[in-house]
Image (cartoon, helix red, strand yellow):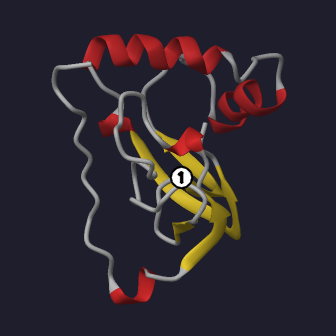
Amino acid sequence: MTGNKLSRFVPPPSPDKLESSGFAVTKKAKRPFSETETCFYCGAAIGAEHRHDCVLVMKKVTVRAIVEYEVQVPADWDEHLILFQRNDGSWCGSNMIGELEELDERDGCLCQHIKWELVEDSDEAFLDEG
C-alpha cells in the first residue's frame, strides 16, 4: 500500500514517568495502517507494557459541572418556589438539556456558562485500548 503514512507524536518521557503501567500492549493499541508493532500513543512494543503516562491507561474521576444561565419563572415566585420547582417539584432535570441546547445555539458554545470542579479522584487505573 502506498500513500501517506500516519505519523504519531510520542512526547519524550519524563524521568519519573518511565515506569511501566502493568498493562500489556495488544494489537488494539496499534492504529490502522501503522507499519510499526507498537502502541500508537506511548510507543511501547506489542507484548510489552504500556508506559505509565500512556493515554490509554485510564482512571475514573467524578466531576461537578456548575452551570449558570438565566431562565424564566413567574414574576411572583421567590427563591423557595424557584428552587422547589427545580429540585423537588415535577420539573425533570432532563428538561435542562433542552435549555442548554437553546443556550448553545444562541451563544455558539457553553464554555462561558460552565465551570468544572473535581469532586473525587480515583487512583485505580484500567486499560482502554478501545
**In the picture shown, does residue 6 fall above or below 1?**
below
Which residue shows up at 33% across the image and 11% down it? 105
Total labels drawn: 1
Q: Secondary structure at mark 1?
A: loop
Q: Is residue 62 visible?
A: yes
Location of residue 106 in the rendering, given as x and y in whole percent from the top left corner = 29, 12
Give whichever of 118, 55 is nearer the camera. Answer: 55
Location of residue 123 in the rendering, given as x and y in whole percent from the top left corner = 68, 72
Hey, which residue is sitting farthest bottom in the picture? 15
The amino acid pointed to by label 1 is Leu
**In the picture shown, does residue 105 fall above or below 7?**
above
Quarter of the image with the C terminus is top right
In this figure, which residue is indicated by the disc labeled 1? Answer: 56
Location of residue 72 in the rendering, given as x and y in whole percent from the top left corner = 50, 16
Q: Picture quarter containing residue 22?
A: bottom right
Which residue shows up at 27% across the image and 19% down it? 1
Quick check: 76 left or right of 44? right
Q: Is residue 120 visible?
A: no
Which residue shows up at 16% across the image and 26% down it? 4
Quick check: 122 left or right of 74? right
